[in-house]
Image: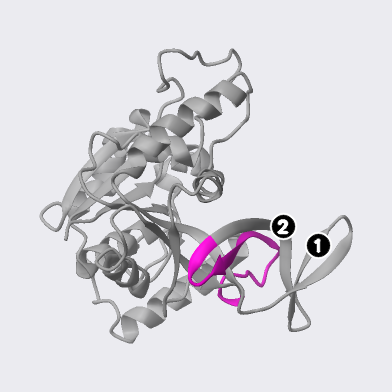
Amino acid sequence: MKLSLIIMAAGMGSRYGGLKQIDSLGPNGEILMEYAVYDAIRAGFSKVIFVIRKDFENEFKDKIGNKFKGSIHVCYAFQALDDIPKAFQVPEGRVKPWGTGQAILSCKDLVNEPFVVQNADDFYGYDAYKTIFSAFNNINNNDGCLVGYPIFKTLSPHGSVTRGLCKSTNGLLQQIDERMKIENKDGKIIYYEDEESFFIDDQSICSMNFWGFPLSYMKTLENEFVNFLTKHGSELKSEWLIPDIVDNSIKNNETDFHVLSCESNWFGVTYPEDKPRVIKLLSDLHEQGEYPSKLW
């Protein structure tokens, strides 16, 4: 079957102050997106769509996108603040686009098959791509899915994190509860809320924004964007985010989302101090033969 990968990279320019400052983490200066594309190719994906800002299109293609020519069909979508339905106007003073939901919707004219969505600056591991690709051969045509990770695999030793904890029944997602200030303290995982601490089972599954959607979900997104803008379109900082969109779909019994597990480890650079650890983990994966000496 055909499956597209959407990599949400529109925030990279603002987050890093320009593409030149994107962290090179692999043995040959690879960035985490390169591993995503490499793993997607060997899992069977047929297309990758980079969601970027129009103002760094040429730089992105030169430094990143052109590496994949001949290996997979590469497309580009552009997330823009003013890319909204004609019935709405951007409020004066708003600077940032409308969130991850809008990032996906910017790809609607490029997608003709089920699609997977991920962050640009996370490492998900080959098994995540293989698992979600296989799932689309087994679930109903209008179902979605999520690859989750045990929370103990997603923490940073250098500070607390925010994670979406998944509640599921018979393998179907029921809701995602966002928890902030999560950390490993004396071998136990806890989070803080209103100055109180609460324990979390270290095997609890959390979302790291690795979602699979049926093609029909693009229409759902179009409708939901109108609903969001009707309620929040006059606000300067409101964001239309994937977990909230999925939560609405579940509550309205519109789409079932299967919670999948994989053998891979997730990692990313949450804090600057995480970078040496990530460099070591990638180096080890190359040495173990999970990746060739050079990806391209």
The amino acid sitting under disc 2 is Met
288 vs 109: above or below: below
In the picture, the disc for residue 180 is 2
- Residue at screen point 29% across, 71% down: 130
Compared across the picture, whether 7 is left or right of 2 comes to right
Marks 1 & 2, CB-CB < 8 Å contact: yes
Q: Residue furthest bottom?
A: 288
**Residue 150 drawn at (x, y percent):** 56, 75
Q: Is residue 155 magenta?
A: yes
In the picture, the disc for residue 192 is 1
Secondary structure state at the residue bearing disc 1 = strand
Image quarter where the N terminus lies is bottom left
Colouring of the image:
one colour
- Residue at screen point 36% across, 28% down: 55
- Residue 40 image-quadrant placement: bottom left
Q: Which residue is nearer to you in this view: 228 or 190?
A: 228
State the extent of the magenta-drawn residues as a range: 152-173
